[in-house]
Image (cartoon, rainbow, N blue to C red):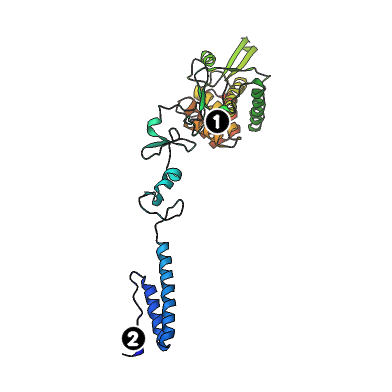
Amino acid sequence: MSKAQKFLTGPTIPGAPTQIQHSLDQAFVVAEDINMGTTRHILFFLLFGVLLSFAAQAKDSTLRCDYCGQPIVGDYIVADSHSYHTSCYENHVALRCAVCGQIINGEHYVDFWGNAVHAYHKGVEPQCEYCGRFISEYTTGGGFRYGDGRIVCKLCEKTAVEDSATVDTIRSQIIALFNTFGIAIDDGYIPISLVDKKVMARLDNDHIDPNGYTYIEKTTSLGITVEQNLDIFLLDGMPRLHVVATLAHELMHVWLYDNGPDDMDPALCEGSCNYAAYLVLQQYPGKESEYIQTTFRDEPDSIYGDGFRRVAEYVEDNGVAEWLSYLKSHRNSPW
């Protein structure tokens, strides 16, 4: 047998990729013109290099955890097409309930803020009166129950308004913003009182859980107003942005009283007051403002919710100036 025939193919490495085996064969063909002693040295280094390459490829094909990157040996968890060590998945990846802290595997609810909660907690565990979060140590650091029964999370309680000085500051900010929209308010320093939920319910027994109320009393003679009395009441302890939204709504009632006809259609009246508050909220960036705006858009009530959506459509089609002009001379809705 000739030397070329003897070294035509190299040794076979079981399981080696085809391209590696082919490279080894080619190396042996090249080596046929070299003396046998040299060839043995070449063979050793070729085999060593091939085995290193094979080991590197084998390492690349090892199943690795998609969280920590380390090899997976034994049982593991596959979630959303990713593989994880059981401990990595449970401690760092798994969706956990914002109320009880346990892993969520089945039906669940996700709130506006992105907190996931087991479905069976909804309607059972308390939610914040103002942000809608489930109250827990995991998400809000706990919460409070006000004396009038309201349940408020610690996040919202941080900005709770409980003094007249803060209310006056907010009033000035709203009136300044109203002016930019063409809504001029001459409040004549209308008194604003902070009251609890029980007092508010007595003041406004036509609505469920009102946050604010504007009391209007006027005396006329021969059809002319000779005396008027305006008072605004706000729930105490509301988060600052809720006070902004509520007071803007009530101040729009004042504008309608001064500029619009009496006995306005309730949906047009309340929808317009909500829309004025919505305009103000849009000047406050952040998730809390977005949340309150969402509650306006999603309000199911036929007067406050449908009225707001109808007014928003009207303003989108005709503009703010035309909306205000319409309110000055019409008591019935344009839809």
Residue at screen point 64% across, 23% down: 167
Residue placed farthest to the bottom in the image? 2
Q: Nearer the viewer, mark 2 or mark 1?
A: 2
Q: Earlier in the sequence, mark 2 or mark 1?
A: 2
Residue 321, by quadrant, is: top right
Residue at screen point 40% across, 30% down: 121
Residue at screen point 43% across, 69% down: 52
Which element carries disc 1, helix, strand or loop? helix
Residue 195, by quadrant, is: top right
Q: Which residue is mark 2?
A: 6
Q: Is residue 211 left or right of residue 82?
A: right
Q: Amino acid at mark 2?
A: Lys
Q: Percent from the top left, x then y, of residue 11?
A: 35, 77
Q: Which residue is mark 1?
A: 155
> Is residue 184 shown to the viewer in this render?
no
Q: Percent from the top left, x then y, of residue 334?
A: 51, 29
Q: Percent from the top left, x then y, of residue 12?
A: 33, 75
